[in-house]
Image: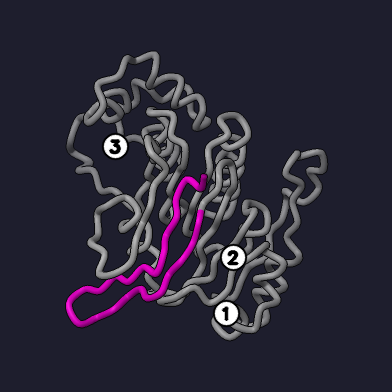
Amino acid sequence: MSLITVTDLHVAYGANTVLRNVALHIEPGEIVTIVGPNGSGKTSLLRAIIGATGVTKGDIALKPGLKIGYVPQRLHIDPTLPITVARFMRLTNKVSKSVCSAALEAAGVPDLLNRQMSQLSGGQFQRVMLARALINEPDVLLLDEATQGLDQRGSAAFYHQIEQVRRETGCAVLMISHELHVVMSASDRVICLNGHVCCEGTPAVVASAPEYRALFGTGTGGALALYRHDHDHNHDHDHGHTHEAAE
């Protein structure tokens, strides 16, 4: 059974319909990336899946007992608030420090447990957010532009970590990304969204789809097609460069 099945989904805010006729499914262990222009409903879709946004019409079916880890687009913490990483991670989930430490290690930042949240770099902050999402050993990770504000090197490292998490835990990943140059490296499937599903498939199929090119231009087709990445990391010669996509 699919982990998540979305059927004929409509989401509206007042008179403004942001999603219509959206259908998608997430299978165990796969990485699926949603791309689309600003205002295309990407965040609304994730929020509907986790129950934070109401559904106007349609259905979202979750596999019974499904555990979801969610990394939001941004989270503001008052820099004057003295709170350690350990305390932050246990705010809504009273787990042991050893569980927090294991989650931080899985997120690639094992040494941050006693650091103040206000002292973290952007990349470290996002890794802590990822660790917090991993505490409950989720079946699926939802990431809403989790690398926003990071430079290219930081983004690439974060997506590399996501692939490692998937390899080690077997969890599925559904993520929104505005960085088209990393989609090829990180995704099994791509869904192009613009209020509705314009096209979907492997990155190579989506890159050549007329609907995708109408939204992003032909330059991004090259970005998707040229940035290649071996999932087993046997070949590391591609890791030193990326291809900028024209938004």
- Residue pictured at 82% horizontal, 43% vertical: 235
Earlier-in-chain disc, 1 versus 2: 2
Q: Amino acid at mark 3?
A: Ser
Q: Callout 2: 10 Å neighbours few (<14), some, many (20+)?
A: many
The residue tagged with tag 2: helix, strand or loop? helix
* Distance CA(mark 1)–CA(mark 2): 10 Å
Magenta region? 1-25
| Residue picked out by circle 2 | 180
The residue tagged with tag 3: helix, strand or loop? helix
Residue 226 percent location from the top left of the image: 76, 65
Picture quadrant where residue 104 is located? top left
The residue lying toward the viewer, choosing from 109 and 25, is: 25
Q: Which mark is residue 216?
A: 1
Furthest-front residue in this view? 1
Earlier-in-chain disc, 2 versus 3: 3
Residue 111 percent location from the top left of the image: 46, 22
The residue tagged with tag 1: helix, strand or loop? helix
Q: Amino acid at mark 1?
A: Phe
Position of 96 with respect to 27 (left or right) is left
Q: Amino acid at mark 2?
A: Leu
The residue lying toward the viewer, choosing from 45 and 225, is: 45
Q: Callout 1: 10 Å neighbours few (<14), some, many (20+)?
A: some
Which is in the foreground here, disc 2 or disc 3? Answer: 2
Magenta highlight: main SS: strand
Q: Are marks 1 and 3 in contact (CB under 8 Å)?
A: no
Position of 222 with respect to 3 (left or right) is right
